Amino acid sequence: MPNAFSEMRGPAAKGDSNELVKWLSPEQEASWQALIRLTTWLPRSIDQQLQRDSNLSMVEFRALAVLSHRQDGKMRMSSLAQMTNASLSHLSHVVTRLEKRGLVYRQPDPVDGRFTNAILTTDGFHEIEKAVPMYFAHARSIVIDVLTREQLRLLGRAAERVMRRIDTLAGR
Amino acid sequence: MPNAFSEMRGPAAKGDSNELVKWLSPEQEASWQALIRLTTWLPRSIDQQLQRDSNLSMVEFRALAVLSHRQDGKMRMSSLAQMTNASLSHLSHVVTRLEKRGLVYRQPDPVDGRFTNAILTTDGFHEIEKAVPMYFAHARSIVIDVLTREQLRLLGRAAERVMRRIDTLAGR
DNA sequence: CAAGATTGACAAATCAATCTTG
DNA sequence: CAAGATTGATTTGTCAATCTTG
């Protein structure tokens, strides 16, 4: 079976040991690659920590954490979806699982039945209380304590800028 | 059904409208949140662009792109897995799908049959050639052109630092 | 028997219907 | 009938078990 290069590359192949240079400057390319690696591995690292220490996924953790910060431990599904970076559909599946584990339960809003509230149970509260310190220890260990104050601040700034752009593009 | 807060929160609930302050300083917290949002939405944005414009996932794109940069368009599965941030198992599934679409094919290494080479086909080469410009246009649009040269450079630096830490923790 | 690779079972996330309520 | 929410089918990724080669 022939491949694309027997014919297509030949003389043309000499100068382009790094073809990407055509698209980004070497400096831009390096930063972009580092960013891609970060957005790939940081979430995996967090997920692994949460799974290992607390048997929770990132979304599950965020959902419980957000609920635990509310006075009444409850929030509408649609709002919770926003807070957890999940689609409503995704969150619904997530809450179903958490419900089976007895960490939250659902209740239609008594005032307007179109809304559903997710509500943290006592068990859920205990679980998230145990999980949070380990989560932040890990956050420190892989990011916060690795960067200088200033590096972290600038990283945050840059992230916010990019996010504003992504939000805009997505029509938010 | 009772929830955790009828009893557990009461007087205690007054001061902690933002309980996370206990774990990180407000500045650290803001940067961390921005970073989490970025690592969640940037990959989604890239995936959407690739899916829409080229019918490729990020891993598929990277696999084809890496192969297209090689003179002979081929690479061992294990090396390709590293280059694409995928596990060997994951990559194997990915290559199976790409193979079904006629974009790559497999061939055991003739010298040492324990290795398998993934090889780009002519079709695969054409597909990735079409995909790359749109990919970089999108990269510019959401990151490169949104930040100053310096911001991008520092973002890259910070990402590299964090990645070194994550690599170390994972034993790499 | 160790390293590379594949496979199948399972878990998680996305998408396109569908259902429910006001 | 529009907004909120759920559901089921499909896809994608992960994990553990297995297979193959030198």
Image (tube, coloured by chain):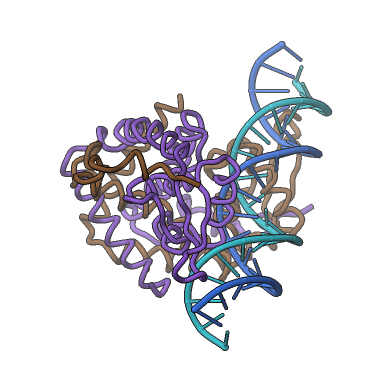
Chain colours: A purple, B brown, C blue, D cyan
Q: Is residue A120 visible?
A: yes
Q: Residue drawn at (75%, 58%), measured in percent from left and top? A: B102
Residue situated in front as seen by the camera: A66 or A53: A66
- Position of the C terminus of chain A by quadrant: bottom left
Q: Is residue B154 visible?
A: no
Quarter of the rendering containing residue B16: top left
Image location of residue B32, percent across then percent down: 29, 46
**As drawn, B141 above or below B87:** below
- In the image, taking residue B172 as reference, residue C3 lies left or right, namely right
Residue situated in front as seen by the camera: B24 or B128: B24
Count of marks, rendered view: 0
Quarter of the rendering containing residue A126: top left
Image location of residue A155, percent across then percent down: 25, 49
Q: Residue drawn at (70%, 53%), measured in percent from left and top? A: B104
Image location of residue C22, percent across then percent down: 49, 78
Q: Hey, which residue is sitting farthest left in the picture?
A: A150
- In the image, taking residue A68 as reference, residue C19 lies left or right, namely right
Q: Residue drawn at (59%, 51%), measured in percent from left and top? A: A96
Image location of residue B124, percent across then percent down: 66, 60
Residue situated in front as seen by the camera: A119 or B144: A119
**As drawn, C6 above or below A67:** above
**As drawn, A121 above or below A162:** above
Q: Residue drawn at (16%, 44%), measured in percent from left and top? A: A150
- In the image, taking residue B26 as reference, residue A116 lies left or right, namely right
- In the image, taking residue A67 as reference, residue C21 lies left or right, namely right
